[in-house]
Image (spheres, grey):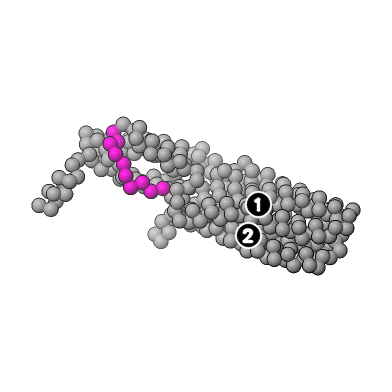
Amino acid sequence: MTEGHHHNTELHDNINRAFIIGIVLNAAFVVVEIIAGFSNNSLALLTDAGHNLSDVGSLLLSLIAFKLAKVKSNDRFTYGYKKTTILASLFNAVILLTAVGAILWEAVNRFSSPREIQGFSVAIVALIGIAINSVTAFMFFRNRKKDLNIKGAYLHLFADALVSLGVVIGGIIMYYTGLYWIDPVLSIIIGVVILYGTFGLLKDSLKLSLDAVPENVEIEKVKSVFIETVGIKDFHHIHIWAISTSQNAMTVHVVVDEKLTSSEITALKCKLKHELEGLNIHHLTVETEIEIDCCNEIECFKN
C-alpha cells in the first residue's frame, strides 16, 4: 500500500467516523430540544430543533455520498458515483433554505401571540447544544478545506454552537425579565444565520453542478504551468471541472515542438501531471498536437 493511498484511506475513515458521531449526537439532541420546546413553549428551541434535524439529514446525506464516492467506476458510470457528493451538498442547501422559510413565518406569527416561557430550562438545553455542536464541529475542523461537504458540515455545526449561545443568553434574559418577545426574535436571528451560511453553500454547489472551475483551482496558475514548460508552443481547449467535492478533472490540447520524440512527449505529460496535482488537478487528460501549419494540412486533406 502506498503512502498516499494509506493517507486517503485514513482520511476517509476519520471523516466517516466524524459523520456517524455527528449524526448520533445531533439526532439525540433533536429529541431533547423537541421535548423541551413543547414543555416550555419555546419557539427558539423548536426552531433550533428543526434546524438540527435538517443538519442530521445533511450529515446523513453527506455520509451516504462519501460511501458512494468510493464505489468503483463501471461501464455506465465511468467516474463512479463521485458526483453524488456535489448533489448531496446542493440538496442540503435546498433543505436548509426551506427550513429557514418555515422558521421566519412562525416567528412573525408568534409576535402577535407571545407565550410564557421557562427561560432557565431553555438556557440549560441550549448549553447542551453548545457542547454537542462544538464537539462535532471540531471533528470536521482539520479537513474543512479539503471537501465542500466537510466545509458545509463544519460551518453548520459551528453556526449551531453560536446560535445555541444566543439561545442561552436569551433564556437567561427571559428568566429574569419576563420579556417573552425575545423568543421569536431569537428565532429570526437563527434564521438569518442559517440563511447567510446556506447561501454560500448553495452558490458553491450550483457552480460545481454546472461544471464551473472549482474554487480551489486558480486557472491562471494552471495556464502558467503550460506557458513555462519547455517544449510546449501553445495550448487551447482547457476544461476544468469537479468530479466530486474533493477531486477535480481537466482536459487540454497542447501544441508541442515537432522535434520532440514520442518518449519526450510522454515525459512532458508526466511532468504536467505532477505539477498540476499541486494545483488541485487530480485527473488530467492531455491531447498533444505537433507544431505544423494547420492551414496547409487542411488544404492537403481537401486535395
Bounds of the magenta segment:
231-240
User: 113 above or below 264?
Assistant: below
Q: Nearer the viewer, residue 286 or 222?
A: 222
Instruction: Indicate left or right for 157 with 213 as reference.
Output: right
Q: Position of residue 236 (x, y in %)?
A: 32, 44
> Tag 1's secondary structure?
helix
| Kind of residue at disc 1 | His
**Which residue position holds label 1?**
156
Q: What residue is rendered at 45% in x and 48% in y?
A: 213
Main SS of the magenta segment? strand
Residue at (79% x, 59% y) in the render: 183
Q: Which mark is residue 13?
A: none
* Residue 184 placement, left or right of 273: right
Where is residue 282 shown, x and y percent of the image? 44, 44
**Front residue (pair 15, 177):** 177
User: Which residue shows up at 28% across the image and 36% down it?
Assistant: 233
Q: Are marks 1 and 2 in contact (CB under 8 Å)?
A: yes
Tell me the amino acid under the disc marked 2.
Leu
What residue sits right under mark 2 in the picture? 96
Q: CA distance from mark 1 to mark 2?
A: 10 Å
